[in-house]
Amino acid sequence: MRTPLATAAPPRRPGGRRRALGLAAAAVAAAALAGCAPVDLLNATIPEDGFTVTRDIAYGPGSRQRLDVYQPARRGPARPPVVVFLYGGGWTAGDKADYLFVAEALTGHGWIAVVADYRVFPQVVFPGFVQDSAAAVGWTLDQAAGLGGDPSRVFVMGHSAGAYNAAMLASDARWLAATGHRPADLAGMIGLAGPYDFWPLTSRTLIRIFGGPDRADAQPIAHVDGDEPPMLLLAGADDGTVAPGNTLRLAAAVDAAGGRVAGRLVPDTNHAEVVLALAAGFRAIAPVLPAIADFIDDPGSVAGPPHPNDGRGGRRSGRAIISAQP
């Protein structure tokens, strides 16, 4: 189970990537000199004329149970997909305002973006942050039509710890059940650099968060049964924060159970870059956004039996896409 299914392609550093990384380094240096966080400087460069935003909508009673809804300024005649984004931060930190660059990338494709805060440690331990993620997604499923979106095309997407939360909602039905929904109500799940099979824990903080070093029911891979919504799992091949094997092992497990999944390692890309590649001006780092766009346009592009929400039937035979490139 823990044997990688693919080896990353040999390093390749095209000129566009070098330029993008140079810009990223310059941005970090400039932010440090100015005394502000790099993400603040990044978001200051993001164009805001392509969307409107309604902030701090409550999906629960707590101060961190709030979400922002970004509406594309231009949309076609059809109701667009809705994408709920859950950020990372090790289940100890995070702020939805930091992910303006993600919302701009999503609305730039004409999709409605929902970026949610959720409670983190020490305010809560597992499963509090999963329950909050489920509540935010449940709210979105209930409100999708009222937002002008297609309620049959609601996706959940996350990076790092947020990808874990998203995977738990897709693989363990009890969390969405508490909101009156089920994983099959989702059109798909998109995970960027997520920890899905990361036991035993050695960090004291993580052991406190999860209630022990080896709590099997708290790992997404333990709940895979093949009934998950279609999944797109991406990770940087050079990720030194969350081992890329997490992505490959979850993809293999979903595939073995008869589910629909594409698991891909992005060559020459690390943990932060796989989400930074969504930002305007940094998309030359890796083709992460095009891969997401292809998946949202057609969740049936991943192997396996058809999913009720893909609208296209999908492939009815063949293996999951488990590879070293997006």
Image: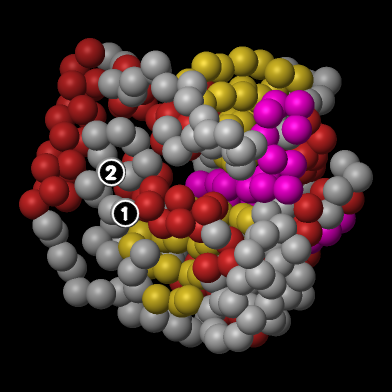
- Quarter of the picture containing the N terminus is bottom right
Which of the labelled discs sits on residue 209, or is there none? none
- Secondary structure found at label 1: loop
Q: Which residues are magenta?
A: 145-174
Q: Residue at x 58, y 61 (%)?
A: 299
Report whether 120 appears left or right of 195.
Answer: right
Q: CA distance from mark 1 to mark 2?
A: 7 Å
Percent x, y of residue 62? 78, 21
Q: Residue at x 67, y 59 (%)?
A: 311
Percent x, y of residue 283? 28, 43
Give the vertical position of 150 relative to 50 (above or below): below
Q: Residue at x 42, y 22 (%)?
A: 50
User: Which residue is label 2 attached to?
Assistant: 283
> In front: 129, or 319?
319
Q: Residue at x 73, y 48 (%)?
A: 152
In the rendered structure, are the residues bearing label 1 and label 2 in contact, judged by CB atoms less than 8 Å apart?
Answer: yes
User: Which residue is label 1 attached to?
Assistant: 287
> Which residue reaches farthest front?
77
Question: Colour scheme in the image?
Answer: secondary structure
- Circle 2 residues within 10 Å: few <14, some 14–19, many ≥20: many
Q: Is residue 124 visible?
A: no
